[in-house]
Image: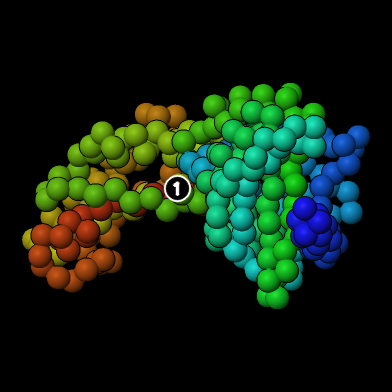
């Protein structure tokens, strides 16, 4: 019995020593809160941690929700993290691993870590749990960031509503879009039309788009005149659909190139298919990400 007590005591001392060496960043309970802001293209809820930085859950049009941790204090840590669901202080349910040894993305300034596919984080916070992100440095020393769900109910409701109203695509996904055609055809299929609907929807909400370049191309088969004609028809078909979907005609610039800019010079069916195309490029005002 005495030996068992000694062992337990030693284990507690060792545990306290480990905890003393570890940093744990979290907001004070009376200072814990969330802020929401959003638009048709992105939804964000932000959790500030005093003397550390911020944690954000971000949903963008066409993308899965991601978790972003921002702080100058995370620079020494590697990009491999553990994420687990933990109980608040006043409950004692066991921790649940959400992501084990997962790869996070690092910003160029090195003070941001981004964890993709963070829907599990949202689910746990919504169910009254907290989320702990464990960071490891090169010496295998751990530190952690604890994300609380205190005062989250209203901002989370706004966040979820915002997510339901996001448009289909973000700018990076549609700034350069391609549409492919069968031989001697300028007909758009259902998938093409759905993509063009998403492009038109984006143009309607982004006042920074000042020009839409629509270019048509052909494969290398046939006479010069026929190649120029079919490439023009393809560009005009795409432009006409955009106009039908509400894009102002004054924004459109239509060009045809025949086979002057081949994707492939091969003559197999796949190569020919890659050359029979029309492209849509969105040009934004200078300084707006064009």
Depth check: give the residue in front, 267 or 85. Answer: 85
Coordinates of residue 152 in the picture (x, y in percent) = 75, 30
- Residue at image position (89%, 54%) is 51
**Where residue 203 sits in the image (x, y, percent)?**
51, 38
Locate residue 195 relative to residue 38 in the image: left or right.
Answer: left
Image coordinates of residue 94 in percent, x first then y, are 65, 40
Left or right side of 119 for 75: right
View extreme (front): residue:
1
The residue that mark 1 highlights is: 174
Whether residue 286 appears in this view of the structure is: no
Q: Residue at x 17, y 56 (%)?
A: 273
122 versus 259 height, above or below = above
10 Å crowding of disc 1: few (<14), some (14-19), many (20+) = some
Residue 154 makes an appearance in the image? yes
- In the rendered image, residue 268, in percent from the top left (x then y), is placed at 10, 65
Q: Is residue 210 left or right of residue 174?
A: right
Q: Please identify the residue farthest to the bottom as the structure is shown.
A: 139
**Location of residue 35 (image quadrant):** top right
In this rendered view, identify the residue nearer to me: 285 or 76. Answer: 76
Q: Quadrant of the C terminus?
A: bottom right
* Rendered view: 121 above or below 108: above
Residue 33 against residue 13 in the figure, above or below: above
Picture layout, residue 43 above or below residue 179? above
> What is the image's colouring?
rainbow
Residue 148 occupies which quadrant of the picture? Answer: top right
Q: Secondary structure at mark 1?
A: helix
Q: Nearer the viewer, residue 240 or 147?
A: 147
**Residue located at (78% from left, 59% from top):** 3
Say which residue appears at 80% left-offset and 37% top-offset.
89
């Amino acid at each position: 019995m005495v030996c068992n007590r000694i062992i337990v005591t030693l284990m507690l001392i060792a545990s306290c020593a480990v905890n003393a060496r570890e940093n744990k960043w979290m907001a004070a309970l009376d200072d814990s809160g969330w802020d929401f802001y959003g638009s048709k293209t992105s939804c964000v809820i932000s959790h500030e941690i005093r003397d550390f930085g911020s944690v954000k859950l971000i949903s963008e049009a066409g993308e899965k929700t991601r978790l972003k941790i921002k702080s100058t204090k995370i620079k020494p840590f590697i990009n491999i993290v553990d994420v687990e669901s933990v109980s608040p202080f006043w409950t004692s349910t066991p921790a649940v691993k959400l992501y084990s040894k997962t790869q996070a993305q690092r910003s160029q300034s090195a003070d941001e870590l981004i964890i993709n596919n963070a829907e599990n984080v949202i689910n746990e916070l919504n169910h009254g749990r907290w989320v702990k992100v464990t960071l490891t440095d090169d010496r295998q020393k751990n530190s952690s960031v604890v994300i609380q769900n205190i005062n989250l109910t209203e901002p989370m409701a706004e966040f979820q509503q915002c997510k339901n109203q996001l448009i289909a695509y973000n700018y990076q996904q549609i700034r350069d879009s391609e549409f492919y055609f069968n031989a001697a055809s300028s007909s758009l299929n259902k998938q093409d039309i759905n993509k063009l609907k998403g492009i038109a929807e984006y143009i309607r909400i982004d006042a920074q788009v000042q020009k839409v370049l629509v270019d048509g191309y052909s494969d290398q088969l046939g006479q010069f005149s026929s190649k120029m004609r079919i490439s023009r028809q393809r560009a005009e078909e795409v432009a006409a659909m955009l106009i039908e979907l509400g894009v102002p005609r004054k924004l459109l610039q239509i060009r045809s190139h025949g086979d002057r800019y081949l994707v492939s010079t091969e003559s197999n069916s796949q190569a020919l298919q890659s050359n029979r195309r029309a492209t849509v490029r969105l040009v934004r005002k200078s300084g707006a990400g064009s």
